[in-house]
Amino acid sequence: MSETLPNIGDMLLATVPMAKTLNLEVVEATAERAVLRLPDQAPFHNHLGGPHAGAMFTLGESASGAIVIGAFGDQMGRAVPLAVNAEIGYKKLAMGPVTATATLGRTKVEVVAELDAGQRPEFPVHVEITREDGAVTGEMTIVWTLRPQA
């Protein structure tokens, strides 16, 4: 079991202004899982009255960033986390508030071992975006790297 680190959400919102612009709410942020919520806000609606695809992408990418901070925050003195690639699939119409849940696709131990070996590790973060009724409206995979600092 892991403890929730209260500063992960604060760190995310302080370093990613777009997350603050969209009023994203950090529900949970640990090394194992990050959950962020996009409230229902008319300025960020699409032509159907639900959250705009760009807002949902930012929600998912921000959730992935929160888990990266949670899992690899202790490595940031020697490596910079960077998103390398992102793919999203919109599965169902999203209406109202939506929630993104991010999980790591590789273990922290594997990634840090590569960093220790002088490599630039890459790892996927999987994100599921859901409506309040639990229906999955989107799925994302964001590939991150830890770029060693020179």
Image (cartoon, rainbow, N blue to C red):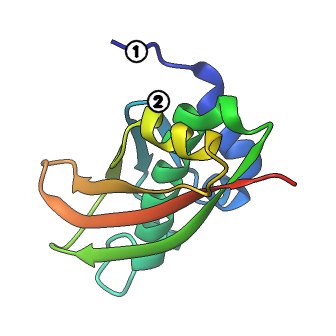
Q: Which residue is drawn at 37% across and 35% down?
A: 33
Q: In this view, does 22 lie to the left or right of 103?
A: right
Left or right: 90 in relation to 150: left
Camera sees residue 29: yes
> SS class of the residue under badge 1?
loop
Q: Which residue is disc 2 drawn over?
A: 31
Q: Position of residue 65 (x, y in %)?
A: 55, 50
Q: What element carries label 2?
A: loop
Q: What residue type is labelled 2?
A: Ala
Q: What residue type is labelled 1?
A: Ser
- Rendered position, 45 above or below 134: below
On the image, the x and y values in percent for residue 130 come to 23, 54
Proximity of marks 1 and 2: CB atoms separated by less than 8 Å:
yes
Question: Which image quarter is the N terminus in?
Answer: top left
Q: Which of 51 and 3 is in front in this view?
A: 3
Q: Is residue 126 above or below residue 44?
A: above
The structure residue drawn at horizontal position 26% and vertical position 65%, both measured from the top left corner, is 139
| Residue at x-position 13% and y-position 48% | 134
Residue in the image at 39% along x and 77% along y: 53
Q: Is residue 52 visible?
A: no
Relative image position of residue 128 (x, y in whole percent): 26, 55
Q: Mark 1 points at which residue?
A: 2
* Quarter of the image where one finds residue 19: bottom right
From the viewer's perspective, is residue 109 above or below residue 64?
above
Residue at far front of view = 117
Q: Is residue 89 left or right of residue 134?
A: right
Q: Mark 1 vs mark 2: which is more N-terminal?
A: 1
